[in-house]
Image (tube, grey):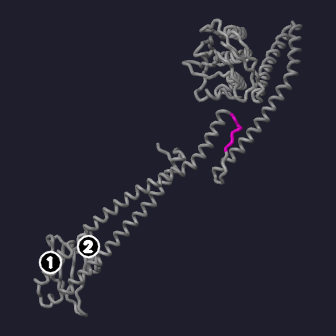
Amino acid sequence: MFKLRDISIRNKLVMIQVFTSVIVLGIFFAVYVVTDVRSYKERKADSMLSLAQVIGTNSISTLEFFDNETAKQILSGLHNVAPEITYAAITDSSGKLFASYSKTTPDSVSIPPALNEKKSVFAGHYLFVRYDINRGKEHFGKVVFQVELSELEQIKQYKYKIATILLFIALAFSFGIALVIQTYVSKRLLSLVHTMEEVGKTGDYNKSIKDEGQDEISILTKVFNSLMQQVKENQQRKDEFISIVSHELKTPLTSVKGYLELLDSVEEKQPNKQFVQKGLENVKKLETLIRDLLDVSKIQSGQLQLNVKEFRVDDLLDETISAIQMVTGTHDIIWENYLSNETITADRHRIEQVLTNLLSNAVKYSPGEKKVIVYSKKIDGELVIKVRDYGIGVPKDERLNIFERFYRSKDMSTTILGFGLGLYICKDIITRHNGRIWVEAEEKGSAFYFTLPFRKIVEPADVKTVTVSTTG
């Protein structure tokens, strides 16, 4: 169903301008046509009354001497003087027809009763005129004309045509002016909207809009800039807090882990040993979280550096898959499309971190399933790694958002634990390697891809990294 609120502001501005122009010009042209027609009627009525007066004056003697033939001749002369008169009649003082002239059948002439009260009456396509023949106080009769208004119809048609042409011309100008005006207004609004969308997608709160106007759009722009500044400051405070807390927790957690490992080595009695091992498991989880928080802090401050060197792809995949397989007893991790003797130049530790995260997620988010498949290919000078699971999948509207910091899927946030940091770190690592990372839906589950170039790593803008040239 058509809804006005669904139309863009750009089109609304054009519609308002054009609609207003239609109303104003319509009223103007209506007044123009009506006034012109009325003026024509008044002139026509006056001219016919003057002619009737001439006929009436010349007919006084014919009425006095009952000279019907002369009166008829006078009326017949109207054919040359005023051919638009289709019927003319002279009546005597008693109201009886004295003489008449008609282009059509006289019986078809119908004199409006209102003519008895008025000197001229417009009825349909005719003008009826009455003139009383008097001399002093003596009344001799009257003259009646029926005048065909074909000329008036032609004038109306002409006026309507001119008005329509002028209306279309005016609308064209109005539409052009509306486009210019709306471009100025909507361009500023669209700039604001696009900036908001970009901030929403990239999380870059350094964006601001320059607008030196004083209208409502300028006020909205200033509010947006102020909001971005507040968000940026809050983000900085949060990053500082994360960095401080992460560093402060790292030292005592290391001590706790050391004591628990010592207890685990000397404690043999159950269930005490089980309690110690549970404590170690949770300490390892905290270590992982703190490591992720430290990586996020480094990413935000631009201090995450890459230790780039050459290594074999198959060795990395084999070691990483074996490590994950050792800690999961629910899934078989299958490696297909085995790459032999392919080397790549990258930060081995960071790429292993990406693989570990993707494989751990594949296991975590496919409960009840039995396998995870890893594919490795070389396509167009790039290493392509695919991690395929058969789990709950990623909703279409969340496939871009899941790589954002602290993002948690609405459907999984209450059932599966996590902080929404892993994929964010993975994306930054792959981006720093000039690669790409994304997710695609499968018939069941999902597949995460990332690519790495078999070429020199070029330092991206605003990213600190170690650059190494290769010939691979």
**What is the secondary structure assignment of the residue under circle 2?**
strand
Task: State whether residue 406 appears in this view.
Answer: no
Q: Amino acid at mark 1?
A: Ser
Identified at 64% across, 33% down, the residue is 201
Left or right of residue 358: residue 17: left
Residue assigned mark 2: 127
Q: Is residue 175 above or below residue 105?
A: above
Badge 2 amino acid: Leu
* Count of picture labels: 2
Q: Looking at the picture, does residue 283 appear above or below residue 157?
A: above
- What residue is shown at x 62% (from left), y 23% (from top)? 438
In the image, the segment drawn in magenta is 203-209
Q: Nearer the viewer, residue 75 or 419?
A: 75
Residue position for label 1: 76
The structure residue drawn at horizontal position 88% and vertical position 21%, both measured from the top left corner, is 252
Density class for disc 2 (Cα within 10 Å; few <14, some 14-19, many ≥20) is some
- Residue 360: image quadrant is top right
Residue 345: x %, y % from top left? 69, 14
Name the spot of residue 108 as percent of width and height, x first: 17, 70
Residue 208 magenta-highlighted = yes
> Looking at the rendering, in which quadrant would you find the C terminus?
top right
Residue in front for this viewpoint, 472 or 406? 472
- Magenta highlight on residue 279: no
